[in-house]
Image (cartoon, rainbow, N blue to C red):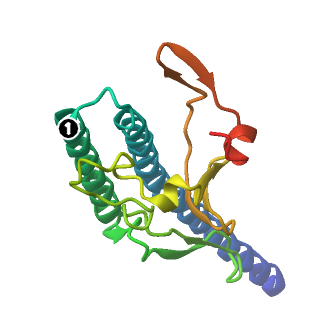
């Protein structure tokens, strides 16, 4: 005889398995999208570190106007690169870092099994960076908001003074060498604004 109940159960399970298989592929696509954004954010992080280094270098009064002009030119180029990264980073033709990406990933076989992702704007202006041609400005590209600590690194996140995460980083750097001296940065030092 025919087993109608067994067939119905079997078909339901097959449907569930196919849904789980697709959910797994969806999750892998989501991971790929996040890895694309992470790579771009890591590059942005490196650029911001270089800009900070240049700002500290420019603040030294051993520099003359021509030195500061060269430093400013590099900072302007780095600012343009941050804007390029923010505007051009895409996954499957979707812009990721221009502030417009809001996604929902279906990671389960059922309709309510989703993960939401909202990536903020990572342009230079959104990060608090400006460009100037003034030779008298020692702060250069880091405007007063950023220099005053409106943004800080907390763990792997860039957060504003309200505690809102405006960017996320994954960087393996644990120390920075300044003038031949190793300076070790811990999460605690970064989080309390000591750096």
Task: Name the side, left or right, on which 79 lies relative to 174.
Answer: left
Is residue 34 at least partly visible in the picture? Answer: no
What residue is at 57 percent from the left and 32 percent from the top?
172
Q: Secondary structure at mark 1?
A: helix
Quarter that holds the N terminus: bottom right
In the depicted view, which residue is nearer to us: 1 or 155? Answer: 155
Q: Position of residue 130 (x, y in %)?
A: 34, 60
What residue is at 71 percent from the left and 47 percent from the top?
191
Total labels drawn: 1
Picture layout, residue 133 above or below residue 59: below
> Are there few (<14), some (14-19), or many (20+) residues within 10 Å of tag 1?
few
Task: Name the side, left or right, on which 139 lies relative to 134.
Answer: right
Residue most extreme to the top: 180
What residue is at 70 percent from the left and 75 percent from the top?
113
Q: Position of residue 158 (x, y in %)?
A: 58, 55
Task: Name the side, left or right, on which 118 lies relative to 78.
Answer: right
Quarter that holds the C terminus: top right
Q: Position of residue 25 (x, y in %)?
A: 54, 61
What residue is at 57 percent from the left and 57 percent from the top?
151
Q: Position of residue 36 (x, y in %)?
A: 43, 53
Is residue 182 at least partly visible in the picture? Answer: yes
Picture layout, residue 53 above or below residue 178: below
Task: Name the side, left or right, on which 80 lies relative to 33.
Answer: left
In the depicted view, which residue is nearer to us: 76 or 99? Answer: 76
Residue most extreme to the bottom: 4
In the depicted view, which residue is nearer to us: 126 or 150? Answer: 150
In this figure, which residue is indicated by the disc labeled 1? 65
Residue 57, quarter of the rendered image:
top left
């Amino acid at each position: 005889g025919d087993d109608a109940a067994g067939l119905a159960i079997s078909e339901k399970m097959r449907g569930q398995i196919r849904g789980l298989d697709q959910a797994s592929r969806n999750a892998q696509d989501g991971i790929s999208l996040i890895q694309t954004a992470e790579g771009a954010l890591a590059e942005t992080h490196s650029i911001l570190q270089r800009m900070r280094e240049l700002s500290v270098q420019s603040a030294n009064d051993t520099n003359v106007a021509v030195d500061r002009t060269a430093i400013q030119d590099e900072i302007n180029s780095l600012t343009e690169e941050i804007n390029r990264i923010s505007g051009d980073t895409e996954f499957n033709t979707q812009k990721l870092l221009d502030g417009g990406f809001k996604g929902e990933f279906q990671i389960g076989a059922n309709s309510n099994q989703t993960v939401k992702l909202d990536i903020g704007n990572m342009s230079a202006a959104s990060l608090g960076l400006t460009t100037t041609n003034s030779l008298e400005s020692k702060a250069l590209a880091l405007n007063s908001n950023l220099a005053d600590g409106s943004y800080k690194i907390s763990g792997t996140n860039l957060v504003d003074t309200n505690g809102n995460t405006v960017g996320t980083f994954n960087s393996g750097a644990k120390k920075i060498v300044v003038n031949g001296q190793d300076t070790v940065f811990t999460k605690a030092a970064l989080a309390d604004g000591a750096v």
